[in-house]
Image (cartoon, helix red, strand yellow):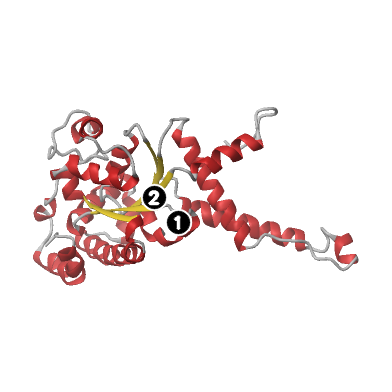
Amino acid sequence: MVGTSEGTYDYARVSGDVASLLDKQIFFVGGMVKSGTSWVQRLLDLHPQVSCGGESHFVGSLFPRLKQALEEHNRHILDKGQNAFRYEIGEEPAVYGSDELLHVVATAILLLMRKEARGRPVLAVGEKTPGNIDAFAFLGELIPRSKCIQVLRDPRDGAISAWHHNWRMNPPEVNKLAPTLSQFVKGFADRWVQHVGGSLKFGALHPDRYLGVRYDDLLDQPGPTLARLCGFLGVDDGETVVRGCVEAASFERSSGGRARGEEDRGSFFRKGVSGDWQSYLDAETHAYVIEKAGPLMRRFGFL
């Protein structure tokens, strides 16, 4: 709950904590839903030198709400009935502009990252929301030197996983938007091309601040893949710490003891495999996915 407790808030201390975060490596993780972003978040947050929170929805929720709040406040103080004296002497009140809005948003992001770190002496602080994939350029400009990690999964597997997840979480909404599996998969493929293709533009412009990791590599080579992530963030990528993170974030532990491939449709960790699409897609739906997403799928080795 937002609020203050009398005598506990120290502006200078909190401001200093926020400013000190800029000396650490700030990063954002994004990807299509059910692509493995939660797994990456967990792997990184288990690292003793990394804090990685999740689902803070800075761009999709926080930004528009803060923007609306400042705009409403601007309208209030520009109302002559609220500022009669200043208008009477020919002055117009100062209002919040784009610089102030972006500063408020950036500060709010860092404040929550500070809280997620829980006082740990970490070197890298980040956040995972799948929708970050559409905002790498915005986030990269908002927070100086920040880095972006994109998690990539074969859109065929991603669509099947998302289908099961959405039916588990909100059946009426799925039934309204895409009542058949074929419709859902086709729509997912269209979005995959749009979102993945768009995020690659940030990587092309800032190759030193972008890293893409594949779900398949997390499955087949979790240690080397996590080590590559650690190197990208400038934290310990040694075998001991990497192995500890991989073991603690394994599917078996996260699912409560199930082996990878053992399905539980009622769990967020449903199956944890690649190639599951082969049991679900008909020829016509599969052909649609290849037509739409084929070039990008080949680029990332999914074909």
> In the structure shown, which secondary structural element does the residue marked by tag 2 occupy?
strand
Amino acid on which disc 2 is placed:
Phe
Q: CA distance from mark 2 to mark 1?
A: 8 Å
Q: Residue at x 48, y 43 (%)?
A: 23
Say what amino acid the circle numbered 1 marks.
Answer: Leu
**Front in this rendered view, residue 111 or 121:** 121
Camera-nearest residue between 140 and 289 = 140
Quadrant of res 271: top left
Query: Dot 1 surroundings within 10 Å: few (below 14), some, or many (20 or more)?
Result: many
* In contact (CB < 8 Å): disc 2 and disc 1: yes
Q: Is residue 272 visible?
A: no
Q: Residues within 10 Å of mark 2 (few under 14, many from 20)?
A: many
Nearest the eye: 146 or 296: 146
Q: Quadrant of the N terminus?
A: top right
Q: Give the image location of residue 165, x and y in percent.
A: 27, 47
- Nearer the N terminus, badge 2 or badge 1? 2
Q: Which residue is mark 1?
A: 139
Left/right placement of residue 185 relative to residue 61 reads left
Residue that label 2 marks? 28
Tell which residue pokes out farthest to the bottom in this image: 291
Element at label 1: helix
